[in-house]
Image (tube, helix red, strand yellow):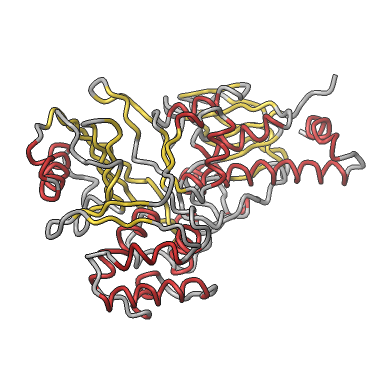
């Protein structure tokens, strides 16, 4: 009986889980190795004061089709909330809550009605924002960073604070002068200028760990608290993974889905594997503050805050509010009590009902390495390596998307397809058929 290839997947984030799931569907035997005790990587959940909370407030948009397809495949569609149309409540200290809603008009006209009545922009601001959106649609080769691009298109300080920063900084998890104009414009075109329904906000109503658990349940072996520290190689092929403590595990192929610094350590000689510049990726932090009140306080599912370190607020259940602080360099090291008080006071300043409510408890989750962005001139790598049976995945790799859940899922899919194609192509070169890839890989290593 032909032995199916055994693949080692390193990293139990959504990139590794998606890659393992895709290979398992093709009949490969998948062993997943994760150094922590939790599944899901950056999109996991854990218990705080008896409440299971997500590590970060991960939301997706309707344009994140790979993620939505994964949720459906894993049987969690009933736990997915998705807006019937794009609508955001905008909160500020100086004005009553404002609402940006999409109309029934085709894109990009669907946003015009909302902009026409948006009180945080002047008439001139609206004209300039509209002009920049038109330019974004046609500019396919932008230069420099996103902040410079916006300056070239005459965006005022008010327009930056009331529109561009609230939507782009959380999407990119970086200040606009730290990300390329190419990536910023991708977000604008994909979410706001393509399909009318693309910007609808969606999120799971169950903890994110349920998604990771459902994917892991379809794999052959899940090894938690098993850190991979290196690779066993024979010539130019991976024959196994080295585990901490000196143990090892054989494999016919390998997917490494970890951050760039860990990838560099596992590869030992990254340039020989086809990677240069892994040390040129900067980590960007995210802080989330969880607040439990004695009553509902938000009045809507989610809202954006202007001129605040708290960019977005989500009321996950009545009285339970999650405050998201992206690109949180100045905050990630602060004590939990200070972060809780910061979020509480920010909500109280824009929501009278939050000021009147009693805070029952608060907690903060911090991820100093939530996302990674390349230094100027450094390109995100693709899935392929110099080794024929080794591929990489991760939200930080070159998927064409910013480092989000969608990028992680797409990278896992690409890694699995790349690995399968490389093995099948190698099999054909040896005189076999693509359908015999399993047998050829088993014989090769």
Among the 4 quarters of the image, the one containing residue 430: top right
- Image position of 100 (left or right of 253): left
Considering the image in quadrants, where does the N terminus appear?
top right
Which percent across, then down, holds residue 188? 44, 63
Which percent across, then down, holds residue 258? 50, 41
Which percent across, then down, holds residue 15? 54, 40
**Residue nearest the observer in this picture, 297 or 329:** 297
**Residue nearest the observer in this picture, 165 or 244:** 165
- Residue at image position (63%, 21%) is 220
- Image position of 413 (left or right of 429): left
Question: In the image, is residue 358 above or below residue 303?
Answer: above
- Image position of 433 (left or right of 24): right
Numbered label tally? 0
Among the 4 quarters of the image, the one containing residue 321: top left
Which percent across, then down, holds residue 372? 42, 52
- Residue at image position (40%, 77%) is 131
Considering the image in quadrants, where does the C terminus appear?
top right
Among the 4 quarters of the image, the one containing residue 236: top right
**Residue nearest the observer in this picture, 206 or 171:** 206
- Residue at image position (57%, 46%) is 410
**Residue nearest the observer in this picture, 83 or 373:** 83
């Amino acid at each position: 009986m032909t032995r199916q290839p055994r693949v080692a997947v390193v990293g139990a984030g959504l990139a590794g889980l998606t890659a393992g799931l895709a290979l398992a569907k093709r009949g490969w035997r998948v062993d997943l190795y994760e150094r922590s005790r939790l599944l899901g990587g950056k999109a996991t959940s854990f218990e705080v004061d008896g409440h299971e909370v997500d590590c970060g407030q991960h939301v997706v948009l309707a344009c994140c089709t790979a993620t939505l397809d994964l949720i459906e495949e894993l049987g969690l569609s009933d736990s997915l909330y998705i807006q019937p149309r794009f609508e955001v409540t905008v909160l500020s200290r100086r004005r009553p809550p404002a609402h940006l809603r999409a109309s029934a008009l085709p894109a990009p006209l669907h946003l015009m009605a909302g902009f026409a009545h948006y009180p945080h922009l002047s008439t001139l601001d609206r004209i300039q924002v509209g002009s920049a959106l038109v330019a974004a649609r046609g500019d396919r080769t932008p230069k420099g960073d996103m902040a410079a691009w916006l300056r070239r298109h005459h965006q005022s300080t008010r327009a930056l604070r009331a529109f561009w920063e609230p939507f782009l900084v959380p999407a990119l998890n970086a200040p606009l002068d730290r990300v390329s104009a190419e990536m910023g414009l991708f977000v604008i075109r994909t979410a706001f200028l393509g399909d009318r329904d693309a910007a609808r906000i969606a999120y799971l109503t169950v903890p994110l760990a349920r998604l990771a658990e459902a994917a892991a349940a379809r794999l052959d072996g899940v090894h938690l608290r098993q850190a991979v520290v290196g690779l066993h190689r024979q010539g130019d092929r991976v024959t196994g993974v080295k585990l901490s403590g000196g143990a090892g595990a054989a494999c016919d192929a390998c997917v490494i889905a970890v951050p760039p610094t860990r990838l560099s350590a596992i590869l030992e000689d990254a340039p020989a594997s086809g990677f240069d510049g892994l040390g040129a990726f900067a980590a960007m932090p995210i802080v989330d503050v969880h607040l439990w009140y004695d009553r509902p306080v938000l009045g809507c599912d989610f809202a954006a805050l202007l001129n605040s370190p708290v960019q977005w607020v989500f009321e996950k259940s009545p009285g339970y509010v999650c405050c998201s602080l992206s690109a949180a360099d100045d905050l990630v090291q602060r004590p939990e009590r200070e972060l809780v008080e910061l979020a509480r006071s920010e909500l109280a300043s824009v929501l009278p009902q939050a000021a009147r409510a009693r805070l029952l408890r608060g907690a903060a989750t911090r991820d100093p390495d939530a996302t990674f962005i390349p230094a100027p001139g450094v390109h995100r790598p693709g899935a392929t390596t110099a080794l024929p049976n080794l591929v990489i995945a991760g939200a930080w790799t070159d998927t064409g998307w910013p480092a989000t859940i969608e990028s992680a899922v797409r990278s896992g899919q690409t890694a699995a397809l790349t690995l399968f194609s490389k093995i099948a192509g190698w099999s054909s070169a040896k005189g076999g058929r693509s359908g015999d890839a399993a047998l050829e890989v088993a014989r090769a290593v």
